[in-house]
Amino acid sequence: EIEAIIYDLDGVITDTAEYHFLAWKALADELNIPFDRSFNEQLKGLSRIDSLEIILQQSNQTYSEEEKQRLAAKKNEHYQKLIQKISPEDLLPGVESFMKEVKQAGIKTGLASASKNAQTVIERLQVTDLLDTLVDAAKVERGKPDPEVFLTAAKQLGVPAACCVGIEDASSGVKAIKAAGMYAVGVGEREYLGQADWVISDTSHLALDSLAKKINE
Ligand code: B16
Ligand code: MG
């Protein structure tokens, strides 16, 4: 029995993943570090500073802690400019109807995002009312693939992890859901989402009946 659904934000509810990519790409170009979409896949779901570390590993230069903080802040400034444009039209296909279906079925809902900008994005998308609880990077100590963000959301909803479904587009996020002991839905390519219990190619395939069928298989 599904008692709660916990959504990832970027790449599941909306495609801020694209804005993260563009902001990192601008920074990497400036630093003359090679960076493309395929490389970007491994950053999805990771915290800002962990993402930066991975990018800087591609450089032959060394950066001080202070410099790293400056670069992370620069990426975030660029990202925040990009997300100003977000509106309800940016909800991914099928997401709004799925979120409403879930609410109507009396299932609790939560957001588990590694982004410190999650609240802003949720407000701009106007889906605040469809989420019973929100856990973001500012509220947890350990980022994905650690399960903390998903476990905190479940706790806040008062639902045991075994009765929760997590939905993720990132490899690190799917790992976090599985480590939390939840059922994992992966959105995207099987290649990146190996550990997911059910992989769908995009959010238009989200539906409660298909999900229930998969869980009972
Ligand atoms: P910020 P999610 C994650 O959000 C993104 O997938 C990841 O690419 C990003 O680096 C991270 O948030 C941190 O975001 O810089 O805004 O704090 O997918 O967990 O919702
Ligand atoms: Mg994501």
Image (spheres, grey):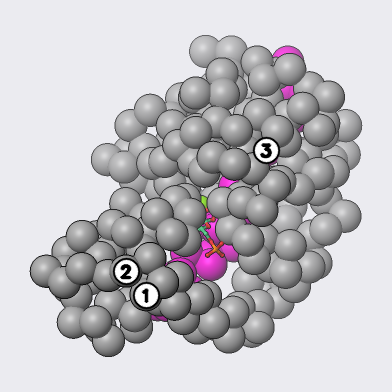
Q: Which mark is residue 90?
A: none
Residue 69 in percent (x, y) is at 45, 70
Nearer to us of marks 2 and 3 is 2
Q: CA distance from mark 3 to mark 1?
A: 35 Å
Quarter in which the N terminus is drawn = top right
Magenta stretch: give its range: 1-24
Q: Label 1, on which residue?
A: 67
Find the distance from the CA under tag 2 to the CA under tag 3.
Answer: 37 Å
Mark 2 is surrounded, within 10 Å at the Cα level, by few (under 14), some (14 to 19) or many (20 or more) other residues, namely few
- Relative to 2, 58 lies left or right: left
Which residue does the numbered mark 2 point to in the structure image? 64
Q: Is residue 186 above or below residue 90?
A: above
Please indicate whether residue 21 sits to the left or right of residue 38 in the image: right
Q: Which residue is mark 3?
A: 6
Amino acid type, label 1:
Glu
Q: Residue at x 55, y 31 (%)?
A: 147
Is the CB atom of the residue marked by disc 2 within 8 angstroms of ligand 1's nearest atom? no
Determine whether 179 is above or below 207 in the image.
Answer: above
Marks 2 and 1: in contact by CB < 8 Å?
A: yes
Mark in front: 3 vs 1: 1
